[in-house]
Amino acid sequence: GRGRAQGSSRSSGAHFLDIVPMPRFFRAFSVHLALSVQLCTTVNGIRLLPQEASWPADYWDGDLNFVRGLVEGGSEEGAESSNAGALDVLVYPLRKLVFCRIRKVASRNFNELFAKLNYNVSWSLGSGSKRVHAETFGLDPVDLTREKGWKWAVFLRNPLLRYLSAWGSKCFAKEEKGMHCVPHLLSSTGSVSDFEQHVLASHMHPERLLEGGDNHWELQQDYCLGLNNATGYDFVGHLHGDVNSQVHAMLRMAGVPETRVDTVFPERRVAGHSTSLDPEVYYRNRTIRKFVRDIYMKDYDLPGL
């Protein structure tokens, strides 16, 4: 349902950071202290972590697996790797299907799907994804309305998982030499501590993340001229559960041939996490979870998040 993300349950007692007013600098220092205390709680030498409800199974069981196939400095999403989020609109004009492509929501795969639909080919990594954008076909996204017979679709992702995925590829794997790591805190080990430091820096200056012009980190709400809570969208999918069936349903809605789906989104049953970026580990601290939720609060108004 709509509302708060999974894993947002809180204990009966309020966290002291939420109830005690304090100057910004001291508050930041207190955050570091609170994290250190919470993460170092041990009993008989065994570290105890806060117990939380299980995370939803994300479709991608290994966000970093694709890195092995990239040349140094490459990108998993095509040549125009950022700064196009506001108009990142893919189209299949033959059936008047419009797709809002959101970075870190299987954007490479959706780009390949629309390439296969439009050109009957498969792009290799690094090929220009603008070739399936609306502008390539001489179309202005503003004019692609329901009144003119166009159908709009979008896939969304749990904001916490999307942030973790962006950090893993941009700050740990250092795609395109780390230029898209915002804030620019690169990690050589991919450790939980490095991730938490990145979250703390992001929470201190969220405007650098959301308004810095790199759409790997922007709100999902800000894509494609503004999602406006997905009002007016004919199909809204989510990057968890049976994504293969969801993509089939999206194409079926617009009368688009479905023969290409299984090669781009392989059919498989997702029973749980086996990702190298396990959210149970990286979001083990509830303050860290809260900070990321705070940054992306507007995205939780989207259906299903």
Image (cartoon, grey):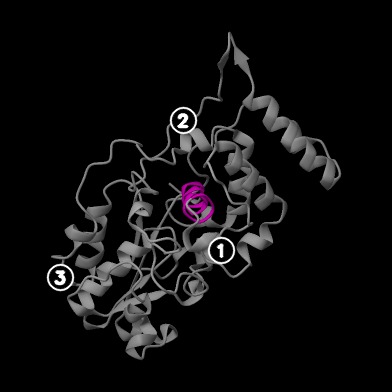
- Residue wearing tag 1: 179
Amino acid at dot 2: Ala
Q: Position of residue 45 (x, y in %)?
A: 58, 12
Front residue of 220/72: it is 72
Front residue of 61/148: it is 61
Q: From which residue to which does the magenta span run?
A: 160-172
Q: Residue at x 48, y 68 (%)?
A: 227
Amino acid at dot 1: Met
Q: Is residue 146 above or below residue 42?
A: below
- Residue wearing tag 2: 53
**Secondary structure under badge 2?**
loop
**Secondary structure under badge 3?**
loop
Q: Is residue 103 above or below residue 241?
A: below
Front residue of 12/121: it is 121
Q: Position of residue 305 (x, y in %)?
A: 46, 50
Q: Going by the picture, which residue comes out furthest to the left?
A: 259
| Of callouts 2 and 1, the N-terminal one | 2
Structural distance between the alpha carbons of marks 1 and 3: 38 Å
Q: Which mark is residue 257?
A: 3
From the viewer's perspective, is 231 left or right of 123? right
| Of callouts 2 and 3, the N-terminal one | 2
Q: Which secondary structure type mostly characterizes the magenta part of the structure?
A: helix
Structural distance between the alpha carbons of marks 2 and 1: 35 Å
The quadrant where residue 233 appears: bottom left
Sort mark 1 into few (<14), some (14-19) or many (20+) by Cα contacts within 10 Å. Answer: some
Q: Position of residue 78 (x, y in %)?
A: 38, 70
| Of callouts 1 and 3, the N-terminal one | 1
**Secondary structure under badge 1?**
loop
